[in-house]
Amino acid sequence: MSEYYQKSIFTLLHDWLDLRSEEVKGFALATFTLFLITASNLLFNNFAETAFLKRFGVDSLPTVILINTISAIVVMSLVGRLLQRFPGQTVLRWVLIFCTLSVALARLAIPLEMKFLYPVVYVMKTQYEILLIFLFWNLVNQIFSTRQSKRLFPLMVSGGILGGLCGSFFTLWFVRLDVLDNILLAYITGTLTAAFLVGRLVSATSTQTVKESGDPKLKTRRLLFAGLHKALPIIKSSALVRWLVLLTLIPNMIPPLLTYQVSFAVDMTYTNESSMLSFFSLYRAVQLLLALILSLFAGRIYNRFGLSGGLLIHPFNHLLIFFAFMLQFDIFTVVYAGISVGVLRQAIQTPGRQALNGVLPDKQRIILLPFLKGVVVRFGALIGATFVVVCQAGYFAICQFPLHPQNLAPIGFIFTFLWIMVALQIKKRALFYL
């Protein structure tokens, strides 16, 4: 009887998920690892934002956003060096253990009532979230073939979204038990389990292509400048590439503005930690559910409106958001802003942006993608974060006094208008491909 059920399970996985019997174990371990990482990240995110806003103060958020951006540049450069010297699974396991130990120390430090602990925790949650997701996909790209990745990765993404939903609902559970600080214990459990699974994942994968070690002779001291040096000749020779650089730069200047505006409105609306944590858990659960549903129709949207038309949905939604902020700045407009931006980015913008890279020749794409995703993205975020800090400090020529977050809306509107102009220029220059 057990053999019958086992055969039935394999048949279901083969027919419905398009899985081969030899792939089941590796796929299950990879998906569960992503599930744990995503659930842990969301739990830590909910706690860190709430604790920072209520125990430290929203007024310091622009400065912390700027520190976050600078930290990301340093951290990703260090990780780039590690990946060139050690196998991907080793780096991911080390980082997971480091995240576990550092969060455990933060949990032990909470009773000491050190106020500056919470900005540190806020920076930690941002860096860990970016870092763990990046290292996970780096690893699975090494151990699964290109042919496997086309079938398996979309299913893994669904597992990650499910992990985010579970993290949201677990947050509500901690709120009901009134043990908010113990959310960090759940994070520790999740990341430690994921670290254990990483080793099992590599050994269980039939198509293992992980490098045993990196090249210690590679010069890694100037990764950012090396990328710029390689990309500059291509940028100078191609007008389309220059527009693609702007299409990467300008959208990444906007998130620091929106992050500050959303956090300010949430802090203004919810007066205690329990109500804020409940809001964040439901808010992110709705965002993930809608992203999952919309992703099922993303292909039809691009078929109906074309790639360029699909890419314009996201910036036009930003125009609507900033216009609404200028008229009314409250929790309702902010909730729409946060959810719609997150959903459209995950379901529409990111897949379309990846497809747009296909207009580049292979040789150019290999050089430009690391430059765009590394240097340009970080530089755009740094510009946006610096802009928010300067305006809030009252040092800018047009900001003689600190601006209320609502008054940042016209600035966001201008950035978004430039974004749309660039997208339209790309549509003209790459019309044949779009």
Image: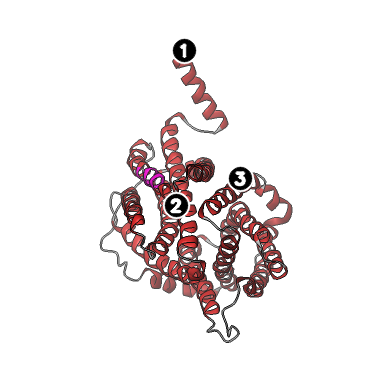
Disc 1 and disc 2 in contact, CB within 8 angstroms: no
Instruction: Please state which of the two labelled residues, at mark 3 or mark 2, is closer to the viewer.
Output: 2
Give amino acid for label 2.
Answer: Phe
- The residue furthest top is 1
The residues bearing labels 1 and 3 have C-alpha atoms spaced at a distance of: 37 Å
Q: Which comes before the other along the chain, label 1 or label 2?
A: 1
Residue bearing the label numbered 2: 44
The reply to whether the magenta stretch includes residue 294 is no
Q: Could you tell me residue 153's position as x and y percent?
A: 50, 44
Of pointers 1 and 3, the one earlier in the residue sequence: 1
Mark linked to residue 1 = 1
How many angstroms separate mark 3 from mark 2 (CA)? 19 Å
Residue 291 % position (x, y): 61, 48
Q: Earlier in the sequence, mark 3 or mark 2?
A: 2
Q: Residue at x 45, y 37 (%)?
A: 27
With respect to residue 413, does 127 lie above or below? Answer: above
Q: In the figure, is residue 294 to the left or right of 216? A: right
Q: Secondary structure at mark 2?
A: helix
Q: Amino acid at mark 1?
A: Met
Q: Main secondary structure of the magenta part?
A: helix
Residue 405 image-quadrant placement: bottom right
Q: Which residue is disc 3 drawn over?
A: 289
Crowd rating for badge 2 (residues with CA inside 10 Å; few <14, some 14–19, many 20+): many
Helix, strand or loop at mark 3: helix
Q: Range of the magenta residues?
A: 185-192
Q: Identity of the amino acid at label 3? A: Leu
Of residues 229 and 119, the one nearer the viewer is 119
Residue 398 coordinates in the image, percent (x, y): 60, 85
Q: Position of residue 76 (x, y in %)?
A: 39, 63
